């Protein structure tokens, strides 16, 4: 038999329940995990990324996700001095290199492409005597060295972006925020489509933690050993939950 609850305590409990219900109503119920804002990745997106490993570590120290700290590789420079004068590009695999429409005459003189006595202040590519050769060299460089760099560097830049996102998320999880943040791994998705609405949400969630390896500086994501897995019987209304893929 339970002791009766004092009126003051009952009023406090009712007030807490009211505040909790009010705050819950402010949050949008999420039926599809892809509608969660913030960090979100799936196993298919991470599989095969350079410097990314899933399900590594030891039995007493499981690491479900490890992301190495990769360094950017600069775009290839033009080997030909004539092409180098006219070539312009950015350190971005998604950008397209191009030829300058004009350059300073002094630049052509310095490259030994025109004599100093004939150097105008500016030289347009259309007026350059070796324009066709420059365009041919550019086409070969773009299809060769540049294309090869884009093919290898694009996935590396994606890993670098993933590393930076997890690093920022680690800082947010360790900081003070008005909205509680949680990193969770969703396991076993439930799917249902009815009346024009789609339910797609993990049945199990495991709370995760992010750490930085002091030796390799790799980002390591582990399950929080002190937290029990959660069973999602209903789609939650917490827009701050972030999901990692099943390891």
Image: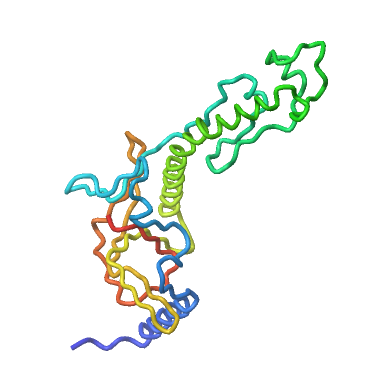
- Quadrant showing the N terminus: bottom left
Q: In terms of image quadrants, where is residue 238?
A: bottom left
- Residue 157 lies, in percent from the top left, at 46, 41
The residue shown at (33%, 39%) is 213
Q: Horizontal and vertical percent for residue 195?
A: 43, 84
Residue depicted at x 43% and y 65%: 34
Q: Quadrant of residue 114?
A: top right
Please name the colour scheme applied to the rendered image: rainbow
In this rendering, would 219 be left or right of 35?
left
Residue situated in front as seen by the camera: 103 or 231 = 103
From this view, report whether residue 31 is shown above or below residue 175.
Answer: below
Q: How many marks?
A: 0
- Expressed as whole percent of the image width and height from the top left, the position of residue 212 reads 35, 42
- Give the camera-side residue of 121 and 33: 121
Place of residue 234 in the rendered image (x, y in percent of width and height, measured from the top left)? 34, 77
User: Residue at the spot x=66%, y=23% of the render?
Assistant: 85
- Residue 130 vs residue 198, the one in the foreground: 130
Q: Is residue 3 left or right of residue 92?
A: left
142 relative position to 133: left or right: left
Q: Residue at x 72, y 19 (%)?
A: 107
Q: Which image quarter holds the C terminus?
A: bottom left
Identify whether 226 is placed above or below 9: above
Instruction: Please say if 52 is above or below 206.
Output: above
């Amino acid at each position: 038999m339970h002791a009766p609850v004092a009126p003051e305590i009952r009023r406090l409990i009712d007030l807490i329940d009211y505040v909790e219900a009010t705050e819950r109503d402010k949050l949008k119920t999420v039926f599809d995990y892809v509608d969660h804002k913030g960090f979100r990745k799936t196993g298919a997106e991470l599989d095969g990324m350079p410097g990314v490993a899933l399900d590594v570590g030891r039995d007493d120290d499981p690491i479900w996700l490890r992301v190495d700290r990769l360094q950017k590789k600069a775009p290839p420079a033009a080997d030909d001095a004539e092409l180098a004068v006219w070539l312009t590009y950015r350190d971005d695999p998604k950008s397209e290199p191009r030829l300058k429409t004009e350059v300073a005459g002094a630049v052509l003189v310095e490259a030994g492409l025109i004599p100093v006595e004939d150097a105008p202040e500016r030289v347009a590519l259309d007026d350059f005597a070796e324009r066709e050769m420059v365009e041919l060299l550019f086409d070969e460089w773009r299809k060769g060295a540049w294309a090869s760099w884009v093919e290898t560097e694009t996935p590396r830049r994606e890993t670098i972006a993933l590393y930076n996102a997890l690093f920022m998320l680690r800082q947010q999880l360790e900081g003070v925020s008005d909205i509680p943040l949680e990193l969770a791994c969703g396991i076993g998705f439930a799917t249902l489509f009815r009346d024009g609405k789609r339910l797609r949400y993990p049945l199990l969630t495991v709370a995760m933690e992010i750490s930085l390896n002091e030796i390799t500086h790799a980002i390591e994501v582990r399950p929080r050993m002190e937290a029990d897995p959660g069973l999602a019987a209903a789609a939650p209304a917490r827009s701050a939950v972030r999901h990692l893929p099943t390891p």
